[in-house]
Image: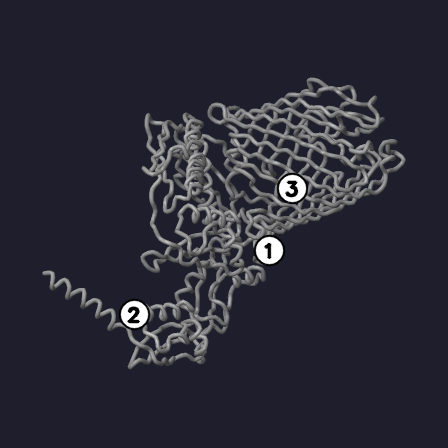
Amino acid sequence: MIKIFYCLIFFFLLSGKLFSQNITNFEIVGNERVSDETIIIFTNLSDIKNKELNDNDLNDIIKNLYSTDFFENVSINVVNGKLLIKVIEYPLIQRVVLSGIKNKDQISLINENIKLKEKNSFIPIKVKNDEKIINNILRVNGYYFSTVNTEIITNQNNTVDIIYNINRGDKAYIRNIKFIGDKKIKSKKLKKIILSEEAKFWKFLTRNKFLDINRIDLDKKILKNYYNNKGYYNVSIESSSARIINESNFQLIFNINAGERFFFNDFKLKLPNNFDKKNFEHIYNMFEKYKNKKYSKKTITDLINETDDVILSKEFQFTKAFYGEKIIDNNKINITISIKETDKFFVNKINIMGNYITEESVIRNEILADEGDPYNEILFEKSLNNIKNSGIFSNVNKTIVEDDENNKTINIIVEEQATGSIMAGAGTGSSGYSTMIGIEEKNYLGKGIKLKANLEINTDSVNFLLDSTNPNYKNSDRSLSYSFENTKKDLMTKSGFKSNKSGFNIATRYEQYEDIYFHPRLSLYYEDIDTNDDASDSYKRQEGSYLENEFSYSLILNKLNQNYLPSEGFKTTFFQSLPIYTDDYSISNMFEMSKYFTIGENAIFSSSFFAKSVNSLNGENVRITKRVFLPQSKLRGFKVGKIGPKDNTDYIGGNYGMALNFATTLPNMFNSFENVDLSLFYDAANIWGVDYNSEIDSNKIRSSTGVAIDWLTIVGPLTFSLTQAITKASTDETETFRFDIGTTF
């Protein structure tokens, strides 16, 4: 038996040796379009003379040639030390014709995204993929019933013409969005969450008004995630359907069963024997914090991320945190987090695929691992999330290809999406009108740079902003932005003055510590103030031109459960502006804090505190355009800009401002009205401090209470409030009723 074993070993060793041959020369046949030199470069044939090649080496040559997409067939033979490579080339694409489309923008977009392009190799298997790409582009633009039939014409010179016969059909509009079932949450709020929108006559820019199955699938995921974070563990979006109203109009219906609300019961952390529990004290503290709180998928994600961060900080290789859930007592869930070993291998190479517009460096800058590192599942998951969060790609995936037992290649495959957008909006209300139009590009020149331009026109002002932001400057995890801004305010008829301010900023933003963000900025502005005979003496004294060079920064602590429509957590912001060189030296400080928590089923209580000060450093009066005025949201029941110190007929603002706000939603009121929300509020605020005349100072606390109604009407969201002033100064101007209506296009 032992002799047989040794004989087998000898046979295999001898066989491995026999399959290796010494190559003295090579010959390439069958190539007409692709030169010998190109094939030599792709296969490294220049280095193989007088070398031994085994089967693996020959297979690598074949794989390298196939990967070029130049060849339909490749075969290799070795005869008497001569390597013979036979290839059959793919035909060349001579023309790509999009028949049935006249819109130049759509033709350009399709040509940019399809894979089979003129002067490229014709690979038949890619035809179906391009048909899918064309249909997806058309459906995003509203042509839900589009069809594509492809015709291939073979020419005599080993070329082909590809003709895509496209029938777009009629555009499919979403005329109505309806939520049915035991959904627990009003339709008005759910409409704000999803991406799909109802088609209205004024919505001429947005594409979300068109029926698109891909977007509907994303809407279902958004809804499920929203309900999960609200505690509805067993929520099911049982179906989504589009009911035909007429030939081109549809009603989009989501059938939601929210189920019962669940709560966290107990948490456990299972550690390997060689892990020290002391390293995970922070995780155990988080367990205590979330115990008996309502279930939230985001909370679990935070726990997993925190656990993974501990693993990374202690440099434990080939490990990752996983979690399990177990329902007990009908509506409680036990969470078990386990740290387990993952596959042990090293990263030989990282390939980036699918980026036809985006520069490869943009994607690689988001990857937290390097070639040659031990494979770390945590880092690669974070890397994929970073790439997804850039907003450049519709899909990001990875595949792992085994090179040998200890080394593997990671392929990161991305699907690019349209990154440009146009935004427009309009509104009117008690204090005047406002309109806005903006253009944004998230991937300027394929470099991942965000470029946007906004123009906003209000009753008394016009503001233009041009901003360019690199979200990850030189792979530093810090953004770098440049912006130009111009603001014109015309208050000649109201207060006898107008101002024109222009300048530019350079700024950066990054996460200094967990959930703590630092945002420094350097600015240079030029402002011109003009007055007329109706202006007060204080305004006339400040007429002239001002140059200001300032350094400002903000520190933000963000512990909200979500930035849009938060229901739990808090956020604090501190801002300070310091003069470097100005014609009037002043320092500005601002602090703001807001807190949210849920009461009962869906009632959300919020409180906020706001304080701001502006003081001169050289004894001069603070410029009128820099003084403190409270925004309307900080003190309802009073006309905007009509409280605080008053000089003759002008409200001049103050050196100090402060506001305290409380509000609560009343979700059980107007239950039968799906598009109406009601809330109660209490506001208290004051503006005081006049540096040039203390006699006109104002030290009266203003306060008000009232009810606010948010109503989603057929022409857009309408907000109106009924307010009663509780305390006020004799010079203040109050308003009992206020409304605002606005929409986007």
- Label 1: which secondary element: strand
Q: CA distance from mark 2 to mark 1?
A: 46 Å
Q: Dot 3, how many residues are within 10 Å of its Cα: few (below 14), some (14-19), or many (20+)?
A: some
Q: Nearer the viewer, mark 2 or mark 1?
A: 2
Residue at left offset 22%, top offset 67%: 13
**Could you tell me the amino acid type at mark 1?**
Tyr
Q: Relative to the observer, which residue lies in front, 452 or 613? A: 613
Q: Could you say which disc has been placed on residue 520 in the image?
A: 3
Q: CA distance from mark 3 to mark 2?
A: 59 Å
**Could you tell me the amino acid type at mark 3?**
Pro
Q: Quadrant of residue 638?
A: top right
Number of marks in picture: 3
Image quarter (top left, top right, bottom left or bottom right) of the N terminus? bottom left
Q: Earlier in the sequence, mark 2 or mark 1?
A: 2
Q: Could you say which disc has been placed on residue 55 in the image?
A: 2
Horizontally, residue 604 falls left or right of residue 744, namely left
**Dot 1 and dot 3 residues touching (CB under 8 Å):** no
- Label 2: which secondary element: helix
Mark 1 = which residue?
444
**Dot 2 and dot 1 residues touching (CB under 8 Å):** no
Does the image show residue 94?
yes
Q: Could you say which disc has been placed on residue 510 in the image?
A: none
Residue 128 spot, x, y in % from top left: 41, 62
Residue 172 spot, x, y in % from top left: 50, 50
